[in-house]
Amino acid sequence: MKCLGCLKEVAHEGYCKKCQRELFGGAKVQPHLSFPSPHSLDPSHYQQQTTRISISGVQVKYSLKLEADKLILSDSNGQFILKPTPFGVFQNLSEAPANEHLTMQLARQVYKLPIPPNALVRFLDGSLGYIVRRFDVQENGTKLLQEDFAQISQRSEQLHGKNYKYDFSYEEIGELIKHIIPTYQVELEKYFKLILFNYLFSNGDAHIKNFSVMHKNEIGYVLTPFYDLLCTRIHLPHESDMALMLFKNNRFSSTYENYGFYTYRDFEEFADILGIRPKRFQKIVESMLSNEKAIIAMVNASFLNQDIKELYIQSYFDKKKRMVMY
Ligand SMILES: [Zn+2]
């Protein structure tokens, strides 16, 4: 049996001690929710007891809170976001909760990126849901001021059209980070790692609303922990490799023009633009490409089905190959 948090071996289905501590402050929470998934025939549970907090594409999200050692749906004071299987016509959608959980755990455990505690839960009907601790809610219940890069760049559907979340570049987000974050050097390196991570793991939906900053009293703005990471290729096989262009002004590098996709050279230039020194860039890429064993082990430990595990690993190797091309 694998822990539904960290995917390490446990005796019974549930969460290991460490995950119980990180997720629930030590409460002995069971992974079984007392209500069915919103795909079940009786949706009354959701209509009566919670409001939908947001919809991004086909993904519905609900709010959960911990009461004693039970996770319950809540309208207010939510501590967790719950994402069931999305509704819609994309492929393998029932694998989406396990996909997001695996991708977030890889980012957290293997790549050491700033990732909030997250796990899987089981609905009453046995299907899996993904939960993540809200990082904007502090221990004392107060909320941190959080802004995403649509707000920061003042882009909206009214002003920039339906495609406003995608009509931007990672270079421009980098420029904004430099403008508004006092400790931008540290944050730009994290940001660079995230963009490369998204490329390696085929997260093709990292649009401007999937990057945020929060305000901390002592230091001003910092990047929030990362969220919404998943291998979108499993659900949309023909989606473009990245949600945004790497470079601004619709520019592609000459190597991109040659190959038709981003390679080592593009990320080298991107790092340079962000102000990451060449030596540092080499070190980051080297370390990010040297995790093969740990990645395969974690994919195999995940709750994806066997076919999707193979697709996930194949997809990683496809991208990794590109990162040794010049
Ligand atoms: Zn665990």
Image: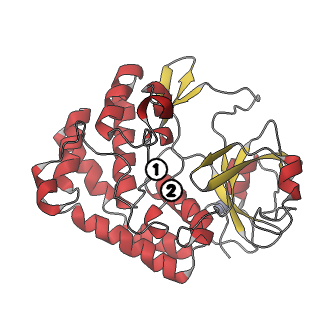
Q: State the residue at coordinates (59%, 68%).
A: 93
Quadrant of the snapshot with the N terminus: bottom right
Residue 122 horizontal/vertical position (percent): 76, 66
User: Tag 2: Cα neighbours inside 10 Å, few (<14), some, or many (≥20)?
Assistant: some
Residue type at the position of mark 2: Gln
Quadrant of the snapshot with the C terminus: bottom left
User: Residue 201, relative to residue 180: is it above or below?
Assistant: below
Q: State the residue at coordinates (22%, 36%).
A: 249
Specify whether 33 is left or right of 130: right
Specify whether 271 is left or right of 42: left
Residue 314 horizontal/vertical position (percent): 37, 75
Q: Which of 24 and 74 is in front in this view?
A: 74
Q: State the residue at coordinates (81%, 57%).
A: 29
Residue type at the position of mark 1: Lys
Q: Which of 29 and 151 is in front in this view?
A: 151
The answer to whether the residue labelled 1 contacts the one labelled 2, judged by CB atoms less than 8 Å apart, is yes
User: Residue 233, relative to residue 272: is it above or below?
Assistant: below
User: From the Cβ of disc 2, is ligand 1 less than 8 Å away?
Assistant: no
Q: Nearer the viewer, residue 98 or 40?
A: 40
Secondary structure under badge 2?
helix
Name the disc covering residue 136, or none: none
The residue at which mark 1 appears reads as: 112
Q: State the residue at coordinates (50%, 19%).
A: 219
Secondary structure under badge 1?
loop
| Residue 71 appears in the figure | no
User: Tag 1: Cα neighbours inside 10 Å, few (<14), some, or many (≥20)?
Assistant: few
Given the current orientation, which residue lies at the most extreme bottom position?
306
Name the disc covering residue 109, or none: 2
Ligand 1 rendered quadrant: bottom right
Specify whether 185 is left or right of 225: left
Residue 109 horizontal/vertical position (percent): 50, 56
